[in-house]
Image (cartoon, rainbow, N blue to C red):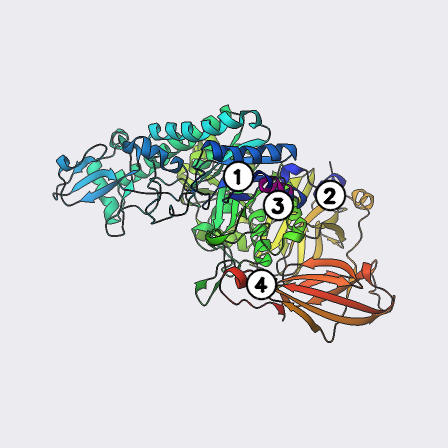
Amino acid sequence: MGLITLTEKLRKPDREYTAFPFWFFNGDFTDEEIIRQIRDFRDKGIYGFVLHPRMGIPESIPYLSDAFMHYVKTAVETAHEERMQVVLYDEGMYPSGSAHGMIAAADPALASVGLTLEDDWDENDHVGEERVVARLANGKFLVCRHNQGTIRGIHFGEDDGEPGAPLSADILNPKAVDLFLKFTHERYYEVLKEYFGSTIIGFFTDEPSILGRNGLGTAEKPFFPWTPGLEEEICSRGGKTEELEALFEGRENRTTAVYHQVITDREGRVYYGKLSSWCEAHGIALMGHPHQSDDIDVQQYFHIPGQDLALRWVAPEKGGLEGMDSVMGKCSSDAARLMGRRRNSNECFGACNRTADGVTIPWYFTGSDMKWYLDWMAVRGVNLFIPHAFYYSIEGARKEERPPDVGANSIWWNHYEQISGYMSRLSYMGTDGKNCADVAVLCDNRNLHWKEVKEFYEKQVVFNYLPLRCLEGCREENGKLVCAGQAYSCVFGDEVHSLLPGGMPSVKRIRSAKEAGEQELRLKNACPTLRLTHFIKEGKECFFIVNEGETAVSEETEIEAGNKVDSCLAAYDLWKNECYGIPVRQQEGRMAFHLELARRESLLLILCTPEEYEQAGLRYRPGKEEIKIQNWKLVGENTDALQKEYEGSFYWEKGKKETTGKDDTEWVLPVSAEEMVEYYINGSFAGVTFWNPHEVKLTDWLKEGENHIRIVVTGNLANRYGNAEVYYGLL
């Protein structure tokens, strides 16, 4: 263990830390094309995928048919041959749990049902599961009835609102879930059993929805989740069915509180619990994510807890701290920590397109966006990335189905090793370390206090969510709250006085980030756009710092050193895959240094001994000298490829400029451009950059005298597929 081990593993992480993109299995399949694409993934540093049946599969290949399973088997066999791993997706599109409508088709009584309020009701006109739950004093009826919810299907004509959309199943009903396992999981196991637990590592369940999509419910006449027999369970916990009328009035009472808890418990026990048990019995993991961003309680059933990051719910232009969805990264990572799970995942980038003038533009997603989102997730503890999506085909209407493609049909594909390597390094960094949070934030399912924790993020206070259900397993030790291997000095939450076991009088209660006290890493001046996580990795104390803002950060910073006054500080740039030393000043038990982070930049800081520092051969980052191109000349434009080509020249003389106090001088070329820039100097490829500020090192390609440089700027695919003009080229 130590600095050498950590940096060596960061330079080339094991394959287990690969990203697992959704592979949209959506075309006119051939074995040859399936094999070619998987090998292409491998060549770009992607060693796993989620095999996701998706809209666009021909009707001649029915879901889970022999023809369908033939192509699935080809994919799995190829992955096996290439030492890659596969996660199976458990539905024909989404939400999960309905087996592409096969459950409702097999037994109409198992279609999704909801609780609705009716002015009158004639039971003679209704059969099956439709029945009166309660007759109200005002003459109205609480009725359980089929809500006609649907899911999205895999064939054209089966999308939301279309006649062929498959009916959703009642996932609160154990009979329906048993059929789901029989139709789906057992079918895959029948064909692929020899790969389970090796090549096949998990099943992905995707945002199961109790009521499905596009059912009868409206704002004026809503449906609430229900299933036969639920009233008995509510009444057994002290509720009264007639009091459920409050749901329709937007009120809460004793019974509605019982109702919400019963729904959560039943969904966990009946749906997630059954799936989890099946996966465990077959040597694989239950993966995926629940329906809501702050569903933390049901994460206990996942072997790899997960969440969903889509549709720009959070975004660079929004700051990343607003709304319920701002908690999703911490929701999955803290759930994993509480359960002792090594990994937690996030399905990211789905339909995450930018807007212009209030209109969302399909395919308008940038390399800059991707970097921001990856850092956003990693600093919150996500350590398994599931990019949404790599498309088997973008032919015809397929390219309009939840774009963009962030894989082979993106502008970055020829240089994807840069992106896949970054995801792997982030994943390795965030796995198997010891979290060093000092603050526990008490929370409930679907109540993760996003407004309250915003201040913690802005003041770089590291915290973990602690669901109230976990408090019984806590204890007090040396003035700290100890739970699941973590020791918290402070506890935040209104419930703290009444719910901590035995009161725990020595544990510090706080009501703001300021009350948490001095942090181990602190800035001279407030910097609310910086995010921080603190952990021990390979025996080394580490800080991962992310600039989520739109401007560079240059700030005097201190790390609490204590007895580490002789320590050195290493910095690892995970994007550039390089490690260097940072000059520090020892003062009063603290290490002081200057922190600089450009827009979209992140940095891993590692405390190390002088011996480790020397053994690693670390040097301070060289001083920079900029190369100026006075007059770029546009020499070519390929509108089909969305490329503009520029040329320039400059005179360079070795040793003309040196920066005092640095090991060497690093010559860089700054470029202001949209969007991707490839650099060729004196005929040799010199690198690629994906966002502003573009800057590439040219030192190794320079020659004495006249130097020629050519750059190729590739624009955003919104210009091709999004029916929008998005500027590209030099700015």
Which residue corresponds to mark 2? 7
Q: Secondary structure at mark 1?
A: strand
Amino acid type at circle 3 is His
Distance CA(mark 4)–CA(mark 3): 23 Å
Compare residues 138 and 280 and report the one nearer the observer: 280
Q: Secondary structure at mark 2?
A: helix
| For the residues bearing labels 2 and 3, Cβ distance under 8 angstroms | no
Residue occupying image coordinates x 53% and y 28%: 192
Amino acid type at circle 4 is Glu
Residue 526 in the figure: left or right of residue 157? right
| For the residues bearing labels 4 and 3, Cβ distance under 8 angstroms | no
**Visible residue check, residue 595:** no
Which residue corresponds to mark 4? 550
Q: Secondary structure at mark 4?
A: loop
Distance CA(mark 1)–CA(mark 3): 34 Å
Extent of the magenta region: 33-39
Which residue corresponds to mark 1? 51
Distance CA(mark 2)–CA(mark 3): 17 Å
Which residue corresponds to mark 3? 534
Q: Where is residue 507 shown, x and y percent of the image?
A: 50, 39
Q: Earlier in the sequence, mark 4 or mark 1?
A: 1
Q: Where is residue 361 shown, x and y percent of the image?
A: 48, 61
Amino acid type at circle 2 is Thr
Distance CA(mark 4)–CA(mark 2): 29 Å
